[in-house]
Structure formats: structure tokens, C-alpha cells
Amino acid sequence: METIQAKWYGPGRSVPIRVIVIHDMEAPEGPKTAENVANWFHTMSASSKASAHVCVDNDSAVRCVADGDRAWHAPGANSDGLGIELAGYARQTRAEWLDTYSKATIEQAAKVVAGWCKKHDIPAKRLTVAELKAGKRGIVGHVDVSKAYGQTNHTDPGPNFPWDYLITRVKAHLDPAPAEPSNPSKPSTPSKPAKYVPPAFPKGLKPNSSAPSAKTLQRALKAAGLMSKSVPEAANYGPKTQDSVAAFHRRYPKYAAKGVARDVAIGPKGWAYLFTLAYGK
């Protein structure tokens, strides 16, 4: 930010900053309005003695007084306020405040105000006159300071100033939206979990066999709650495995061999259902 030091101001502060005061310059719109008004503060005669902390127009912000010093901008709020001057007139309509030039000016102001809000812990909200008098922290117009303390009759930034737009832009700079990726890709659609497919039924698996191993069957029986987890795994399709398979068939008789009261062998259909039972669908 360019600095053009104002001639008249109060060095240092005795109280913390609590308010930000919005002013208009009563100066025509132009690309050098901020610089011109800052230079006016720099060369001002002793009969005027005024200043502001920052001046903004559509493409620049100019520092005139340091935050730690008191600009002479709004009597009643000079000791605990920061003043910012916007290019334009208090007589402007809302539409004129929201034309291309003034929206750019408000954007410059919003950046400065957001920086102040963050630095000095000031809420991004406009205070009522009553809140200002009560010592609340926030953003006001020179008109609000005039009404609160009665030391001036200034009415800037005017009755049509778009406070809602300014506050919205200040908040946007305080909490910027995440940047869009430079090459956004189409969001992926979560795929449905695949249906559980049990291992293929091992040919040759039968009571007292050890080839192929019975360990896979034993793990499924344990997972289904049909075999004690304390039983050690073994390749052999021995008596404990047979007892557990029999328990499975008693619970689900449709998978048992016809006419067998205690079927200790497991077939392909029983195998598939056991694994579904043990590990889900």
C-alpha cells in the first residue's frame, strides 16, 4: 500500500481500537482520487486539520496515518477508531454506489476493513448508534458518530450507502472460499461394495481328509459361531471339525444329506451358505 503521510494527526493512542468509521470523500470518481485526497491531507492548511487512516478509490488504497496514531476524521471516535475514506459522494443513490466504479472502490475498502477486523479483533458488523455509544466493537459510518456524540453534523457515507454489500465483501475477505482446482475432475461416484463371494468349494474335502486342508472350513465355522475359537487350526478334517459341521446341519437341515440325522460332511451348497453366514453377503 502506498503511503502519503497526512499533515495533521495525533501521535499514539491511549485506548485500544474498537471501531472502524466509513467516510466518503465528497470527491469525484477517478483513477487517482485516493492519491489526490491523500495529497490534500498531506498539504492541508492549519484552518482545516483533518485526516484519515486510509483513502481508497477503484484501483488503489493509500495509507495516510498509521493504525497506532489518531487520524482526525470523526470527533468522538478519533481516540478508538480507524477512518477510511471512499471516493464518491454522500448524495449517491444505491445504484450509483453499486455501479462498476463504486463497487471496485467498495472492494478496495473491504480488503482494508477486513485486515483491520482481523488485526484488531473487530466484528464485521455495522453497529447501531446505541451500540456505538455503549462501547461495542464494530463498523460505523461518520453519520453514526455524529448522532452518537454530537460533535459534528456529517452524514457520510450517505443514506443510500450499501452497507449490506460492504459487510458481505468484508466477510468474504475474512473467510475466503476455497479455491477451485485448476483442472477440476468429475467427482467419482462411490461404488457399491462387491457382493461377498466365498472361496470355491475344494474338491476332495471330506471327513478325515487332510488334502486339501480343512483350515479354511474351520475359520468359517469359528466366524459363524459353530466352532470354539480355542480349537487350534489343523489341516485334517478331524472329529472337532466334523462335530461343528454336524451342528451347522442341525441348524440348517436343508443343507444336510437326505435321511442323515448327523451329517458330518459338507457339500458345495452348504459350503457357500456357511461362508455367507460367517462373512456376510
Image (cartoon, rainbow, N blue to C red):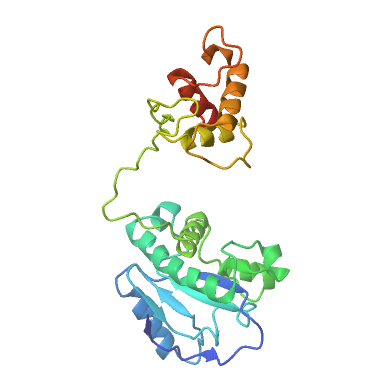
- Residue 232 placement: quadrant: top right
Q: Position of residue 253 (x, y in %)?
A: 58, 13
Give the answer, above or below, for where 252 lies relative to 143.
above
Asked whether residue 74 is in view, the answer is no
Q: Position of residue 193 (x, y in %)?
A: 43, 34
Of the pair 188 and 277, the residue shown nearer to us: 277
Q: Is residue 35 left or right of residue 126?
A: left
- Residue 247 placement: quadrant: top right
Q: Residue furthest top?
A: 259
Of the pair 158 and 65, the residue shown nearer to us: 65
Give the answer, above or below, for where 244 lies relative to 4.
above
Residue positioned 27% across, 56% down in the render: 182
Residue positioned 37% across, 80% down in the render: 1
Residue positioned 51% across, 55% down in the render: 164
Q: Is residue 55 left or right of residue 150?
A: left
Give the answer, above or below, for where 269 lies relative to 212.
above
Q: Position of residue 64 (x, y in %)?
A: 44, 84
Of the pair 160 and 271, the residue shown nearer to us: 271
Q: Residue furthest left?
A: 183
Q: Position of residue 87 (x, y in %)?
A: 40, 69
Of the pair 187 and 241, the residue shown nearer to us: 241
Q: Residue furthest front?
A: 208
